[in-house]
Amino acid sequence: MATIDEPDSPTTQDAIDEMGDGEPAIEARVGWRYTLAQIRKDPTAMTGLFVIAVVGVLAAFATIDSILFEYLAQYQVFAQFGVEKYWIAKTVWMSPVSEPVGTPRLLPPVGFENQFGAGTWAHPLGTDDRGRDILLRIIYGSRIAVTVGLSATVVGFVSGTVVGAVSGYYGDWVDDALMRAAETLFAIPFLVLVLAFIAVFGRSLTFIVFGVGIASIPTFARLIRSRVVSIREEDYIEAARAAGVTDRNIIFRHVIPNSFTPVLVQATLQVGTAILIVAGLSFLGFGVQPPTPSWGQMLAVSRNYMIPNPWFSIWPGMAILITVVGFNIFGDGLRDALDPRFNN
């Protein structure tokens, strides 16, 4: 019977052509290097990564500057100059002199003019209702957004992963108990659940982080459980059981690592959700309290001045929008890089 000779596949042919020292040069489509290579090929993912990097740098700058102020304030270094908190960056970075007392309120950005005056380069994005520089307060607000967004996501990510993995691995009554509890949390609106949590435990930043993190546990738990249910019957899991490996080691060394991909992608998307929730809490007055700047709080104050100075509302809103979109499009790119269905 005649046979048809099929040409070698590109991967096989490349391995033969590039063979050296007795080892085939086959490019593995797994691992962090391959994932990074796929992300670099995706302009959308790189745009999201760039936004995240910029916001992260601004948050780090604001954190260092705030720590510097707290340290130097103990020795009253700036008291003689009348420099208030959150103005040191303006003093040492954007202007050679200390911030003058009585800065005009509600100034527009550079190139615009309103009833309060014309925009100046001393305040590129204008000033708020108390004469404070909006650009600097947005930079300091990034510290709250990044800190709370990442910290709350880590809380939900770790807790939800453990709950979902244990639930899917053991099944039976353990699965029923854990997932019914998760579904109870999932049935309560996200914002309402967080408000209830901080109403009971307090409005401190720590409780806000844990409130947002706990509210996101069901999302991660349900996602990883669906993967674990299919993985727990795999041959390598059965082999580990037969070898006497404890359930704890099987879960943390085999089950969770092999179910990790969709949860990691969800984590990047969840950061944007956490930032939105924290901004909403600050807008309602339950989040970060004045004088600490946060984007939601700036929006709450600016609603009283939207007619005379709409820029006051636009800038913090744009900061929230750009940051959340950055995390979301990076999450989409990460999903495409990790999912073999999207890789050719």
Image (cartoon, rainbow, N blue to C red):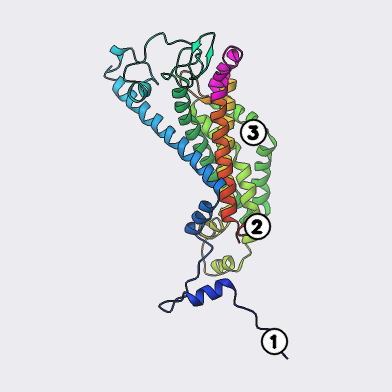
Q: Which mark is residue 229?
A: 2
Mark 2 crowdedness (10 Å alpha carbons): few <14, some 14-19, many ≥20:
some
Badge 1: residue crowd in 10 Å (few <14, some 14–19, many ≥20): few
Residue 25 vs 310, above or below: the answer is below
| Visible residue check, residue 160 | no
Q: Position of residue 312 (x, y in %)?
A: 54, 19
Marking on residue 190: 3
- State whether residue 338 is above or below residue 210: below
Relative to the observer, which residue lies in front, 52 or 257? 52
The numbered mark, 2 or 3, whose residue comes first in the sequence reads: 3
Q: Quadrant of residue 281?
A: top right
Q: Secondary structure at mark 2?
A: helix
Tell me if 2 is positioned left or right of 238 in this view: right
Q: Which residues are magenta?
A: 296-315
Determine contact: label 2, label 3, CB under 8 Å: no
* Pointer 3 local density, CA inside 10 Å: few below 14, some 14–19, many at least 20: some
Q: CA distance from mark 3 to mark 1?
A: 62 Å
Q: Residue at x 42, y 36 (%)?
A: 57
